[in-house]
Amino acid sequence: MDPLFDEFRSIVARRFVIEGELFEFDTPIFYVAETSDLKDRFLGLLRDLEPINYLASMRRSNGGIVIQIFKKPPTKTGNKRIITLLFFSTLLTTFIAGFLQSAIFGNPYLNAALFTAAIMAILGLHEMGHKIAIKKYHLEASGPYFIPGPPPLGTFGALIRLRSMIPNRDALFDMGMMGPTIGFAVSIIVTIAGLSLSDMRWVKEVPPHVLSLPFLYRYLVILLLKKPPNPHNLPHLLVILHPVAFAGYIGILITMLNLIPAGQLDGGHIAYCMLKPMGRRLLSFIAIGYLFLTGYWFFALFALFTMAQRHPEPLDSVSDVSLSRKIAVSLVIAIFVLSLTPIQMI
């Protein structure tokens, strides 16, 4: 038996009424009484175990509450050289992407710099939203890994690597919600600024590869851009997006991708907190099917790929998400719907 077993029993007994105990496969296991404040008691237990570098999990088994104590797994530190290299590489690729979009908007170097600043602000503040939630729960994570990409986007987004285990559904929900919410708000600001620099023209034919705009973006175009006169009675009105406006479009698109309720995407984290496994799976396939119908097949395939891995459980899989977060999920749903693109009826 682990010489620390008596100490573990004492620590658990501070927070719970122990109804049974055993030592199995080098793991101390305690059966505890169920109470109305299990979530807070378990968070207190995690704090008590922190000084001796141990963690705990809380599961429901055979109608009872089971707590297991285990050694805190080693954490990998982020590679600062790679983080720095990817950051400057993404600055370069987004600048090139912005430069290629700037031919009809005057100074291409200035517009490319504005595009780079806008897209990096959207991505960076999205990741900062995640970091805020991570700091709130005293967890550890790497710095943001920006991912360079080819034109016209110049990037495939950014990510951070969580180095700690998530304590409960509240923490998982906050981490899933904070990034897309902040990124979405910044994307709206960037879009409004970019549309003030954009143009509308009447054309005889619609050129190939015209962007299909999300619901919210279409509304902002109608609200902010004045329809020009049509002296030659041309059939099509085309929006010519300034690179900054295109950065806002990318930001809204990234928000939609992140909020797909699948796998370990941000939306997948939120769905895990709110729905049973069958409901999560059904909602995932509905969202992915919608992406196929709107032409975003690459995003749809990526979302399918994320479903291949089982979503990890938080340390506390017993406690439900809080009522305030159940209410806040309506905001997440609204953001996701506004970021979607209408299905084109043929």
Image (tube, grey):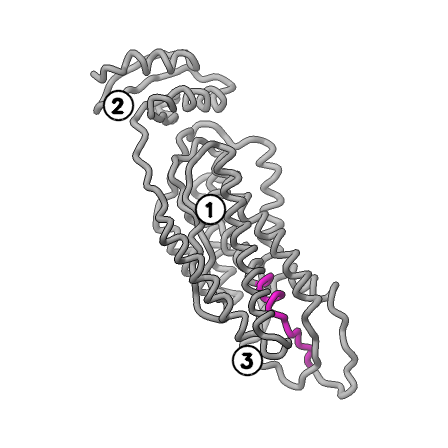
Q: Does the magenta portion include 240?
A: yes
51 left or right, relative to 283: left
First in residue order: circle 3 vs circle 2: 2
Q: Which residues are drawn in magenta?
A: 236-249
First in residue order: circle 1 vs circle 2: 2
Residue, x 53% and y 47% (percent of image)? 179
Check disc 2 and report the residue beneath it: 27
Check disc 3 and report the residue beneath it: 208
Residue, x 58% and y 47% (percent of image)? 181
Residue 83: x, y in percent? 40, 52
Residue 30: x, y in percent? 33, 17
Figure quadrant of residue 104: bottom right
272 left or right, relative to 20: right
- Viewer-closest of 96 and 317: 96
Query: In 3D space, how far apart are the residues under numbered discs 3 and 2 (Cα atoms)?
Result: 62 Å
Check disc 1 and report the residue beneath it: 268
- Viewer-closest of 76 and 1: 76
Q: Is residue 17 above or below residue 41?
A: above
First in residue order: circle 3 vs circle 1: 3
Q: Is label 2 in a helix, a strand or a loop? A: strand
Residue 26: x, y in percent? 22, 23
Query: In 3D space, how far apart are the residues under numbered discs 1 and 2 (Cα atoms)?
Result: 31 Å
Q: Is label 3 in a helix, a strand or a loop? A: loop
Amino acid type shown at disc 1: Gly
Extreme residue in the bottom direction:
232
Residue 207: x, y in percent? 58, 81
